[in-house]
Image (cartoon, grey):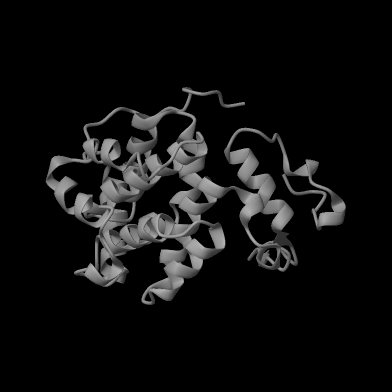
Amino acid sequence: MRQRGEVPCRASRAGEPFRSQHQDLAAALHFQVEGRAAGNGSLMRAATSAVYFARAGRTATMDAARRIAALTHGDPAAWEGTAVLHELVRVALDGDDPLTAVPDTLDRVHGDHRERWAAVLAPGWHPGAATEFNGAVWPCLGTALWALRTTHAFEDALSAAVDVGGDTDTVAAVTGALAGAVYGYTAIPARWTEPLHIPLPGFGNRVLHTAHLVALAQRLDGRAPSMRSASPDAHTPQNYT
């Protein structure tokens, strides 16, 4: 079982993750396909890694975020935005307010990117002030924070993010990561979780339901040894580990 502080993550200067030939190649291929290097995909997928690395502390979780983002996104702005999201999720999971943690988190952002990130994460920022489509990292994370700041419930935060329009699925995913860390699983409306199902390509008819996803989240957080503990009545496949 992973214990606090035991996550291997080689230290790096802010915004300068260790890179390999494979990372550079992956980022280059992603840019060829997507046409941009600071897209919000690095934020969209960050919820799971943010939960996993949260127990390792601020430096480790932010460094891990940069490394993971660098696998597909060549622009350091994407690395820094993902690092900010990782840290704000960590703060929320510790029971503190991620909104009040923004200034300290920005202090850990690489100086070349701090001013731009500070602008979109400022308390007075509004999605209408965005200078890019919200498929880019800056307005995507800025909108997620704005939605969290201007609402008082998980559902309301998600609704606010979606109502902005644009790249709604990714903006909502990022908002959900933050709001979920703040409000917890029980704040998610049952009408959203009860019908949830995810077919697994390549696994026959195997489908993940809400119980599976909760168990996976607990494993990421180091609190559950196996998905076998979920009830068969909750659609748990008995051979899934």
Placement of the N terminus among the 4 image quadrants: top right
Above or below residue 220? Residue 151 is below
Above or below residue 138? Residue 8 is above
Placement of the C terminus among the 4 image quadrants: top right
Which quadrant of the view contains residue 91? Answer: top left
Tell me where residue 39 appears, x and y as whole percent.
30, 63
Tell me where residue 57 appears, x and y as whole percent.
41, 28
Viewer-proximal residue among 219 and 88: 88
Viewer-proximal residue among 109 and 205: 109
Q: Residue at x 30, y 49 (%)?
A: 70
Tell me where residue 27 appears, x and y as whole percent.
28, 56
Q: Residue at x 18, y 45 (%)?
A: 114
Is 8 on the left-hand or right-hand side of 236?
Answer: left
Residue 120 can be seen in this image: yes
Is 110 on the left-hand or right-hand side of 7?
Answer: left
Viewer-proximal residue among 201 and 182: 182
Residue 18 can be seen in this image: no
